[in-house]
Amino acid sequence: MRHIHGQHVRPVMIALTTIDHRRPACSKQTQLPMYSYRYPFLYLLLLTFLPICASAQVWQADFSTEGTPTEKHWRYDRELYHITGGALHLSVPKEPPRGSATLATDILLPKQPIWRGQVKTDLIPTAYNHATILLCAIKPLAEKSYEYVALDFGQGGQQCINLRRVRVGRSDSHPTEFILSPLGRPLISSPILLNTSGSWDYDVRYSAEAGWQLYLREAGSEQEWELIGEEEDFRPTLPEKNTFGISCTFTSTHHTGWHFRQLRIYPASETDPIGGEGTPPRPEPVPTPTPTPRLLLSEVMPHPKAGCPEYIELYNASDSPCELGDYALAAGRDGSSYKITPLPPRTIPAGSYIVVTKDPDALAAAYPDAPRETFVKASLPRLLNQSGLIGLLLGDDGLVVDLLHYDSSLLPKGLKSKAGIALERKDFQAIEEAGNWHAAARSAGFATPGQKNSSPEEGGGNQDDTSRKRLSDEELFTLLDSSPDGECHFTLYRLTGELLARGTSLARDSWIQSLRTMPAEALRIIGVSAEGPLLLHIKLTRPDGTRLERSLLFRIVGL
């Protein structure tokens, strides 16, 4: 996220006014809302957020003409999208390395609107790779921001589909970029996890009497529409003259991973003008149970000693055999830069270990007491020595069933070399990552491939590392203020180790800043509802490349 400055407001308003004067009038005249006089910039933003008005009853995105979206119908980051095959595709060059791309168009909103469309992803969403459908504007929030209801696909790296309220603002320091940030917890949250090669049909409905409903189904299947949830308490008055938009965040690694088709808006009083399907069935929402993984990450060796290959150990925590070939491993620097390796066929008995490595023979030579029969060969991507990410994926859709963010701070202090020290899982009943990993014990030779993990009490974990010390809230804010352009990566946990939220932003834009004056609202911003003691862990990377890690223990009462 980029900070908003005020020095470019006047040039942006002039440009918007010029575009608006060139646009032909809409077919249906609408009285200007009262806030157009109080917030002229916002009203211009609303009017010029893109193309000319479509039908007052039915709107459909025209993706019939291939190439760059036309200026007649779309505005803003048109050059970062491409139309082909009846669909709109994110098509960003590898430079810039990270950013967002936004399109929007003017619409006339029916009184009981239905939004339908199809979204396909070729990646696992992360904090830097997600998509947002801006369904409609609600109201102005300040002179440069507006509240929208949006359908987000993986915002914040949560890997699920949420209907939520978001703040949309134009960055004056970067006039071509919009800033999107969540407002409170999601209105409706889907238990369905997003993964690679996923394609979803969405159906969002709203009326002032009943509120919001979200339906989803897997695209291209015979699956019935599933009512994911309803929200009856939030029933705003929707301005008739409105906007519809799409915003994608991207990185140089994943800059073409989102695809959109069959986008349309129509009133509930009419049948679907495209599909002719009418209203989806309205069954009682049935939560989709999260599958209990049989296989879990157990031990990793990212920095082996000389002559020994890297390895990743897995453990079948269930009471029945499972197939290794049903899984894949992802490994890389972080959630935006990784490689996926399919695993070979192999039956793993209940309560058994399996060790995946590039060279089983070399691993057996390095650990002669380890059970050689548990070693299997696979073309693992190289594991980074200092820090990285390892994920265990299940099925053709790549459902993420286990994840480890590791770094060298888990290793013991005082040793001449950190090579050859494995990281081990403490508890196979706990899925959460926080506090559940430790360095293998010295008495076990710092590694236990294919064998029971060593006791965490024996591990040489770095408990006294001052780079990870806890601090007061005043010290935390002083730290962030000292490096406003630094990259701030945060993770928020309960003291039980349950991961509540994770994200990354510039230090000056971090939601953590709101902890100064509005601690309860700070949690709502990231969609967290939790009382009692919480542990906030910060990794701050300064512009000069130096990195600091700090933890803050705090309590919020009365959420």
Image (cartoon, grey):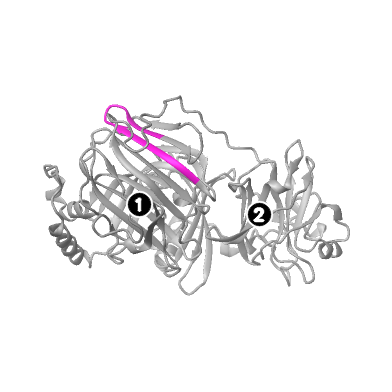
Residue sitting at x 35%, y 50%: 517
Q: Secondary structure at mark 1?
A: strand
Query: Is the C-beta separation of discs 1 and 2 under 8 Å?
Result: no
Q: Residue 210: x percent and y percent?
A: 31, 27
* Residue closer to the observer: 458 or 243: 243
Residue 13 image position (x, y, % from top left): 18, 61
Residue 541 % position (x, y): 49, 67
491 to the left or right of 54: right
Quadrant of the image for the C terminus? top left
Q: Nearer the viewer, residue 291 or 76?
A: 76
Quadrant assignment, res 148: top left
Tell me, yes or no, whether the highlighted magenta stretch contains residue 482. Answer: no
Residue 227 position, x and y percent, is 44, 31
Relative vertical location of residue 183 with respect to residue 254 in this rendering, above or below: above
Separation of residues labelled 1 and 2 (CA atoms): 31 Å
Which stretch appears magenta? 199-214
Disc 1 crowd, CA 10 A, few/some/many (<14, 14-19, 20+): some
Q: Residue at x 78, y 72 (%)?
A: 306
Give the residue displayed 75% in from the left and 49% down from the top.
345
Identify whether 438 is placed above or below 58.
below
Q: Residue at x 50, y 72 (%)?
A: 545
Three-letter amino acid code at the position of disc 2? Leu
Prevailing SS of the magenta stretch: strand
| Residue located beneath label 2 in the image | 329
Q: Mark 1 highlights which residue?
A: 246
